[in-house]
Each structure stands twice: as structure tokens, then as C-alpha cells.
Image: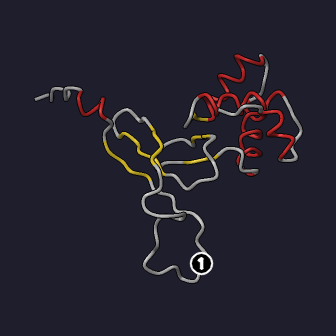
């Protein structure tokens, strides 16, 4: 959790605004949160606020590297405050739960392609898909025959 969000904003050359503080608090308290959920939490905290203001704050904070945006295939973008490392994610195909998993092997970018085609690679994005322990333990729905 971010200790002093206002100080964090200042250190990155950003103006301290109520919207940015609310967004940082929401992302810090709810890892892998969607923009819609950030909006709901910010609106509950601040009252009247536009959805666009939240999207702008999320984009600015992601551009500055204060939060990380991930977008798993077929899912809305999600935001987290775990930045500065090259961790990956486990996603449950059944309930959509997202959890962090440390780098696959070695230092960033964790994975080396067979042919980098001249790119200087500094990050690898890996998403592991499957079923979480709770969904694996749940009984399968009865089939309709």
C-alpha cells in the first residue's frame, strides 16, 4: 500500500489532486481493479466526479509509472500499484480472479525469445490462465441433457 500518495505524486512531478489521490488509494487497496470499480470507489469518496476524470487520472498515473495497466485478453483493463518489477499474473477462467506471480525465470525480462529481431527487450508480459483453487474445488454444474 502506498504510504503517502501526495508525496508520491509530487516526487513524480504531478499536481496533487483529489481525483489522483482517490485513484491511488483505490488501486492500492484493490489490486487488479478495473477502471469502472475505481470510478465507483472515487465517486463514493469524493461525490460528484466524472468518469473521464478517472480515466485521465489512471492514464496519467500509468504513464508516470506509478501504477501498472494490464489488459488480459477478453477482459477490461485492470490496474495495480505493483510497479518496478516484471511480475506476471494468474487468472482464473471461471471467476476471473487475478493474482500476482513472480517472474518466471531469472532477471527481467524473465523470458528470452528465440529471435529478438534486433529489439532491446526490457519486459515480458506473461499471463497464466487456468482455474483458481476455489473454482477447482467447487462442484461442476450439472449438464442439461
For the residue pair 108 and 65, the one nearer the viewer reads as 108
Q: Counting other residues with Cα less than 10 Å from the Cα at mark 1, is it few (<14), some (14-19), or many (20 or more)? A: few
> Where's the C terminus, which quadrant?
top left
> Residue 123's spot in the image, x, y percent?
57, 63
Q: Residue furthest left?
A: 145
Residue at image location 19% in from the left, 29% down from the top: 140
Residue at image location 72% in from the left, 38% down from the top: 55
For the residue pair 144 and 114, the one nearer the viewer reads as 114
For the residue pair 52 and 94, the one nearer the viewer reads as 94
Q: Secondary structure at mark 1?
A: loop
> Where's the N terminus, which quadrant?
top right
Residue where numbered disc 1 is placed = 119
> Residue 23's spot in the image, x, y percent?
72, 32
Left or right of 31? Residue 44 is right
> Residue 76's spot in the image, x, y percent?
54, 41
Please say if 18 is above or below 115. above
Left or right of 100? Residue 70 is right
Please say if 46 is above or below 10. above
Residue at image location 86% in from the left, 31% down from the top: 17
Please say if 56 is above or below 127. above
Amino acid at each position: 500500500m502506498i504510504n503517502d500518495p501526495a508525496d508520491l505524486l509530487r516526487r513524480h512531478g504531478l499536481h496533487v489532486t483529489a481525483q489522483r489521490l482517490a485513484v491511488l488509494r483505490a488501486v492500492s487497496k484493490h489490486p487488479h481493479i478495473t477502471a469502472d470499480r475505481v470510478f465507483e470507489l472515487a465517486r463514493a469518496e469524493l461525490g460528484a466526479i466524472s468518469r473521464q476524470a478517472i480515466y485521465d487520472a489512471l492514464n496519467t498515473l500509468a504513464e508516470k509509472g506509478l501504477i501498472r495497466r494490464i489488459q488480459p485478453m477478453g477482459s477490461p483493463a485492470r490496474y495495480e500499484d505493483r510497479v518496478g518489477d516484471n511480475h506476471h499474473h494468474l487468472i482464473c477462467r471461471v471467476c476471473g480472479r487475478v493474482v500476482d506471480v513472480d517472474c518466471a525465470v531469472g532477471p527481467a525480462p524473465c523470458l528470452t525469445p528465440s529471435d529478438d529481431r534486433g529489439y532491446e527487450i526490457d519486459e515480458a508480459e506473461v499471463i497464466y490462465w487456468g482455474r483458481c483453487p476455489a473454482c477447482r474445488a467447487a462442484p461442476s454444474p450439472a449438464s442439461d441433457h
